[in-house]
Amino acid sequence: MKKIFYSLILGLAFAVLLGGCEKFNDQFEGLADMTKLTNVAAYTYTLTSADYTTISSAAKAATTDPAKIALATSIGTNKFFTNSAPASEYVPYLLKTKYPYGDLGSTAMITYTLGEDQPTYLNDLRTVNILNNADYQSAWGGGNYVSAFTPTFTPAAKIPAILAAKFPTAANGLYKFVEYNYSAIDAVTDITEVSYYAYDWSTHTVTSSPYTVVSEAGWMSKDVLGSLNWFCRTYSSNNYAQVSSYNSGAINQVYMISPEINLQTAVAPLFTFNIVAGYSNADCLTVWISENFDGTEAGIGTATWTDISSNFTLPQSPSGYSVSANAGVADLTAYAGKKVRIAFRYDGDGRSAANRGTDPAKTTTYQVDNVKVSEEKVALSVASSEKQYVTYKFNGSAWVPADNTFVALQPVDYTTIGFSYISSANVPLYIPNYLGQKFPYALEGNIKTVIYKSSSNPNYSGAAQFKLTNGTWVPNSFKITRTEQFVYSNAGWLFDPTVKMVMEQSDYQLMVDYVLATPAIAKFANPQYKNEEFYYGFGSRYSNVSFRLSYRNPYFSGQAYGFPASGDAELYAASTDAAKVALLWERLKKGMEKFAQLRYPNAVAKVSGVDVYYYLTTYLYYPTGVNAGNEYHEYVFKCTGSGNPPTFEYVSDRTVN
């Protein structure tokens, strides 16, 4: 848009002639004396980085309000204005020291940087939502599952429900970046052993003199009657747990208790172990299970223990050691869905014969190994899977895939780029080339938001928006350059949103196209060249408004251009050329109002609380014989409301040359 600035002295003279316009731009009180001023200046300036610092310091010095201080500080830090800290409010802090000598009515066209509000989804997409086993189990129905999606168990069908469960209070417009596993081959059914617990003491510390007490990996040993322990022993490079009251000199009741075993996902778990007996002289070993043992020595006596020894057969070997063998299997189905601990309890008597009296010795040695709780299950499996990434949006009622302007980088993309993740420093270096290769047929102005892993931390991601500009994908900094007008008044420098422009060839063509597209007046446009119309008089052929009557009169040469013989009934009803021209003036006023609507479809009534006026200047050609000649003519309109189209109120018009 081309802007021009006329002397405010002329503007004042015209305003005086328009008695009905005394309130026009009355925020600039004092302009009534402009005819006496000689130093009315028109400045043009672009803010520098240092200017933002100056503005910030001056604005902070002018207030004690913490909120305003924070806004002023942001200007100095960011080096741009925002909707919260607008140029209309803060630029005057600079102008009052930069241009202190201009008279009332001086103007300053200031070019500055505006930081636009970034889309909230850029923040939404800074976390990777990695689906876990519980998500897949839920998606597969809670029974057999694999931690992946497949061609017949698709992510598109299951991810929306997973997100709905994860984010039950999601707001409309919320975005989420999701990582999931995908197998290109459907899952197959297998029978597999599921182990809930297994221990063979192979990693336990084992020493002699003294022997190492079984006390690692969550196991504990406690003699509730004496001081005997289960010890970790080794033979032929095999570790195991051993206990015996031989030479203990006391009555013993020694517990060896497992760590907590989680059977919450079990269906029919089975418990088994291997056993060796040596020099048997009594049945000293029993096996117990508890759901409420708290893991403390004091808790051994208060816990509820259930004897499950009947499930096992313990060997007898009076003259030596038996061969290691499986002791049997205990069905723990009753404990499925629970957490339990298993105890091996040894009841022995190692007192001397003199101290035992008639009681028999009980010193059988036991070696326990290969403790295992497991079950066979029918399970699903996939040979392999690969991580995939997708972006979803909550539309107010359901989670749906984000539209195709959102691009999530996939594993193959990272391989192609040569990184396992994209740092913020590498985003502008690599993503433009990536977009160029991925979207070779993208059109100018297309926008893509790229979501990517931003760190070696698997939960971190980033999002950046790019726009195809002159054939290159350019990062959107969400900063734009604007030029606004300020005017010097009795109150100092104030923001002035006034729009001033002179019509150019494209503007005249805009009105010709409007007439061509409007059935009621389309007959008044030149059908041969489509570059001029004779209702209002706009023409891009000569870039002017023509009041030439000959083109409008069917009795003259206008017929040679295909003008309809029916003519312009309203115009021909006027008896003289002067009356016809007067009618054309009225039409032009309405035509300029329509031009304002077409030229400024996003017009608003106020900017920063200030009324917005439009000074629209057209070039006018008069017909021969009626004040023949050319002139620039300015129309002033006030925007009274935004909309489609916006509304304008005629204020005035005048000749400006």
Image (cartoon, helix red, strand yellow):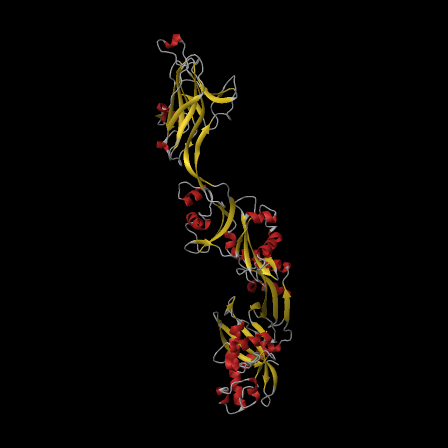
Front position in the image: 110 or 414 = 414
> x%, y% of residue 123?
51, 52
- Residue 300 as seen in the image, left or right of residue 543: left
Q: Is residue 484 visible?
A: yes
In this rendering, the count of numbered labels is 0
Quarter of the image holding residue 473? bottom right
Front position in the image: 63 or 447 = 447
Quarter of the image holding residue 223? top left
> x%, y% of residue 453?
55, 48
- Residue 210 as seen in the image, left or right of residue 113: left
Q: Residue at x 47, y 23 (%)?
A: 214
Q: In which quadrant will I find the C terminus?
A: bottom right
The image shows residue 87, relative to residue 350, as above or below, that is below
> x%, y% of residue 55?
60, 60
Question: Going by the picture, which residue comes out furthest to the bottom?
Answer: 575
Front position in the image: 62 or 488 = 488
Q: In which quadrant will I find the N terminus?
A: bottom right
The image shows residue 496, relative to residue 401, as above or below, that is below
The image shows residue 655, relative to residue 393, as above or below, that is below
Front position in the image: 228 or 447 = 447
Q: Is residue 127 visible?
A: no
> x%, y% of residue 38?
64, 75
Quarter of the image holding residue 379? top left
